Image (cartoon, grey):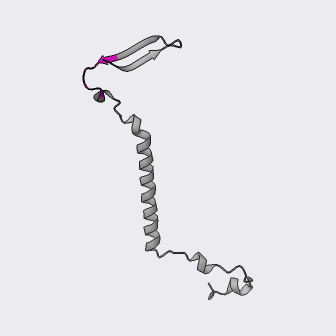
Amino acid sequence: MKIYTKILLDKDDNIIEEKYFNYSGPISYAGIHYDFKSTRGAKAMEKQAKREKKLAERKAKREAKMGKSDKKEEKSIPLDQVITLDHLTNPEKK
């Protein structure tokens, strides 16, 4: 059986060049074997996801170490309250 590695055809489907080797054995061993180039995209996506996960873990760890939490909610003034000069200048009110 011929196993083709390269076939070059012209616009009328005539063979210009062909490269093959003769193979005799189980057909299951004659299948496509993947190499580095065929899986490069998937590996790059996995690497990017791993990098983003690591950065997120570092950021969470850093924020936990510094004691940073949702303090923005504590500092905000409710919408139904009028902002006065006392809110802006008094250092005791936070």
Q: Is residue 23 magenta?
A: yes
Q: Residue at x 47, y 70 (%)?
A: 63
Q: Which quarter of the rendered picture does the N terminus lie within?
A: top left
Q: Does the magenta stretch include residue 52?
A: no
Q: Give the range drawn in magenta.
A: 20-27
Q: Residue at x 56, y 77 (%)?
A: 71
Question: Along the horizontal axis of the image, is 15 left or right of 28?
Answer: right
Q: Is residue 15 above or below residue 71?
A: above
Q: Is residue 85 above or below residue 46?
A: below
Residue 38 at x, y percent in the picture:
40, 35
Question: Along the horizontal axis of the image, is 21 left or right of 11?
Answer: left
Residue 89 at x, y percent in the picture:
69, 85
Question: Along the horizontal axis of the image, is 54 left or right of 21?
Answer: right
In front: 58, or 22?
22
Residue sticking out furthest to the bottom:
92
Q: Which residue is drawn at 43% across and 68% down?
A: 61
Q: In this view, does 78 lie above or below 45?
A: below
In front: 79, or 9?
9
In front: 12, or 40?
12
Residue 30 at x, y percent in the picture:
31, 27
Tell me the quarter of the picture where residue 2 sits.
Answer: top left
Q: Which quarter of the rendered picture does the C terminus lie within?
A: bottom right
Residue 20 at x, y percent in the picture:
34, 17
Q: In this view, does 85 lie above or below 66?
A: below
Tell me the quarter of the picture where residue 72 sits.
Answer: bottom right
Q: How many labels does the image show?
A: 0
Question: Along the horizontal axis of the image, is 41 left or right of 32?
Answer: right
